Image: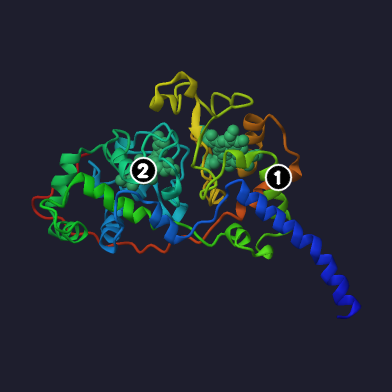
Amino acid sequence: MTLRTLIFALALVPLAAHADDLRHDALAASLAPIDAASALKAVKGNDVTPAKIELGQKLFFDPRLSKSQLISCASCHNLSLGGADTGSTSVGHGWQKGPRRAPTVLNAVFNSAQFWDGRAEDLKAQAKGPIQAAVEMSNTPAAVEATLRSMPGYVKDFDAAFPHEAQPVTFDNMAKAIEAFEATLVTPGARFDKFLAGDDAALNDSEKKGLRLFLDKGCASCHSGPNIGGAAYFSFGVAKAPSEELRPIADKGRSAVTKSASDDFVFRAAPLRNVALRAPYFHTGKVWSLDEAVNLMAVHQLGTTLSPEETREIVAFLGSLNGEAPKVAYPTLPPRASETPRPQY
Ligand code: HEC
Ligand code: HEC
């Protein structure tokens, strides 16, 4: 070994040790990597088969599940826009505005429950909500079943996805097929995951500093698990109540689910994978910059303020959570038949 390589090697020792500590602390804080196989395993009570995934993909893109036949899941969960839509809150049936920001469907399978308030226990329970919500797709289970049963192409697809069932075309099976498809909407390969797997060079210095701050300031105590959030509920405003614009008094969050006043203004800690790709932020969608969202978290959840440099580093770290978007082909949907119900505006 020449003197130069020796000096070089010695200089690397503290850096490598530092990366090992950081990785160790991140894993100890329950930050965890994701992959396609663990997503399929996260689905409970529903065998994910290729036939179900293919059917679910069609249903996800089919606007005929809505009363107007104009609105599909993909209208508000646009896979080309990080799995969400562009507004603060979503626009649904009859141009009505809903009360909350659309969360992304990407990696939703890793959340411990669905919706900002966790009121659906899993994706199959969740999928039945928007189809019936008056401000979203405004339809009924019976009308959806009639529409699907009217199209021979769908009858064939449901038969293949739910073999040996006397009547495969049901609202429940529709939801199971959508869940199976959503379990494929994951974004593995984030540089953060590569770092967790042992690749020290996957994060640059400023991202590493950001991760250290994310751990040491306490962000990771709420945003943890494979989705870096989406796992537990906390008051939005632990340290200081957010403004009425950010947290309107009318939306009490989780207390509407648990019927317990102690859950007033409690929300699920937002999942942070790909967060840099899908402004605006918070359940009201009122914050358009990630820097500002991070600063607000420090003030309202931790009772502290961040220096501009700290904010920059945390935001740099959050950028390392961007993964590879799933490759989803636009499906050709079964053609309508003469008895298929007509759109109703
Ligand atoms: C009109 C817009 C709109 C349509 C159409 C729509 N959604 Fe949503 N979606 C939302 C909004 C808004 C929320 C959050 C509501 C809440 O938390 O109360 C949401 C929440 C979700 C979630 C929960 C994600 C999370 O992190 O908790 C999933 C999954 C989802 N929708 C899937 C679907 C599927 C599947 C369909 C089609 C059957 C669909 N959505 C149709 C707007 C929409
Ligand atoms: C006490 C728990 C808690 C702590 C600590 C916390 N958060 Fe949050 N975070 C939440 C909750 C709850 C939400 C959802 C708030 C809402 O209802 O919109 C959230 C939302 C967010 C969002 C918005 C994501 C989106 O998709 O809209 C970002 C970004 C965020 N947190 C980052 C951070 C960072 C960075 C830190 C550390 C500086 C941090 N959080 C600390 C609980 C916490």
Ligand 1 falls in quadrant: top left
Q: Amino acid at mark 2?
A: Asp
Mark 2: secondary structure: loop
Expressed as whole percent of the image width and height from the top left, the position of residue 299 reads 66, 31
Q: Mark 1 or 2 closer to N-term?
A: 2
Q: Is residue 287 visible?
A: no
Q: Distance from label 1 to label 2 (Cα)?
A: 32 Å
Residue shown at 33%/36% (left/top)? 95
User: Which residue does the numbered mark 1 point to in the structure image?
Assistant: 213
* Residue 329 found in image quarter: bottom left
Q: Nearer the viewer, residue 261 or 252?
A: 261
User: Residue placed farthest to the bottom in the image?
Assistant: 1
User: Which residue does the numbered mark 2 point to in the structure image?
Assistant: 122
Mark 1: secondary structure: helix
Expressed as whole percent of the image width and height from the top left, the position of residue 222 reads 57, 38
Expressed as whole percent of the image width and height from the top left, the position of residue 70 reads 27, 46
Q: As drawn, is 21 to the left or to the right of 126?
A: right
Q: As drawn, is 92 to the left or to the right of 230?
A: left
The response on whether ligand 2 sits within 8 Å of label 1 is yes
Image: 145 above or below 261: below
- The residue carrying pointer 1 sits among few (fewer than 14), some (14 to 19) or many (20 or more) residues within 10 Å by Cα, namely some
